[in-house]
Amino acid sequence: MSNWALFKNMTRLYSVTVMVVPVILGTISAYAMQKEFSILLFLLTLVGAVSAHIFSNMVNDLWDYRNGTDTQATETEGAISTHSGFLTSGTMTEKKFAAITWGFLVLAGACGLILTIVSGWPILAIALIGALIAYFYVAPPIKFGYRGKGYSEIGIFISFGILPVLGAYYVQTGEFALAPLLLSLPVGMLTTMLLFNHHFLHWRADREIGKKTLVVMWGEERALRLSKLMTILAYVLLIVSVVFHALPVYGLVAIISVIPMYKVYKSLGKVNPSETYLPLMGASQQSSVLCGLIMCVGLLL
């Protein structure tokens, strides 16, 4: 593969849209509500947020490899591994992979430091919370992504919904507000669904290695019902943002973003082979990005 193809696979670059959209949403909400916009601050926020996301992807790969989770997923019949494969296949040494991983955290930290100097200390607090969630998702001693009980879903909801939208808004305006918080909720919930639904791909391997995701804890059938209920909740939160005037009423057009997930849900039974969940994972990302972009258009209009 070319160096670019290797980079995309190593960082799972396809997934960064779920971080880019919340940053854009927070920035546009600052302009729509306060008429504040700085292109330089926006670009710094975007680079920092994307770097933090890539760090999260890679540090999860690193610790899942060290914990044996990725190897188990590769060896378990019927499981579909979602890691980059760089470590399990020997494509890259652990030392080199770790160095690149921490390099992205340094880049994210540098952007956060500049934004803190310009916009204020709350940005440093937001960056620190995000970094701790990203690292301890699978890293010891906390490994909250292995503990079940919804800890990992809460972490994703905060990291890919509340923090990037509120952070981007604060960078531009120097203040927090209820409206961007409400706007972050539907997008954050839909991105949480991306994480939740990807656990269906290898939940049996997770169970063998002791990784207690909600899919492992609840079982496939009950977890699939929960997935559908959480999707409904995301669009209830969209309606709430309109009711409280964070989003204009025509922002409700974003409800059409449920269509990709609805189509996949219709095709699933109570119990399914692992590969049938691949379209659900893709649909989760499509719905999250589409919902956020339509909300952005609604705010601009």
Image (spheres, rainbow, N blue to C red):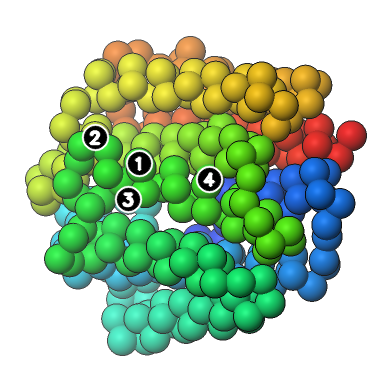
Binning the other alpha carbons within 10 Å of mark 3 as few (below 14), some (14 to 19) or many (20 upward) gives many
**Residue 294 placement (x, y as % from top left):** 75, 33
Q: Residue at x 41, y 81 (%)?
A: 102
Which residue lies under the disc numbered 4?
A: 161
| In-image side of 144 versus 135 (left or right) | left
Marks 2/1: CA distance?
A: 9 Å
- Residue type for callout 2: Leu
Quadrant for the N terminus, please.
bottom right
Residue 77: quarter of image: top left
In the rendered structure, which disc, 2 or 1, sits on the residue that comes first in sequence?
A: 1
- Closest to the camera, between mark 3 and mark 2, is 2
Which residue lies under the disc numbered 1?
A: 153
In the rendered structure, which disc, 2 or 4, sits on the residue that comes first in sequence?
A: 4
Which residue lies under the disc numbered 3?
A: 81
Marks 1/4: CA distance?
A: 11 Å
- Residue type for callout 4: Gly
Of all residues shown, which one is farthest toward the right? Answer: 301
In the rendered structure, which disc, 3 or 2, sits on the residue that comes first in sequence?
A: 3
**Residue 196 placement (x, y as % from top left):** 37, 37
> Dot 1: what SS?
helix
Residue 291: quarter of image: top right
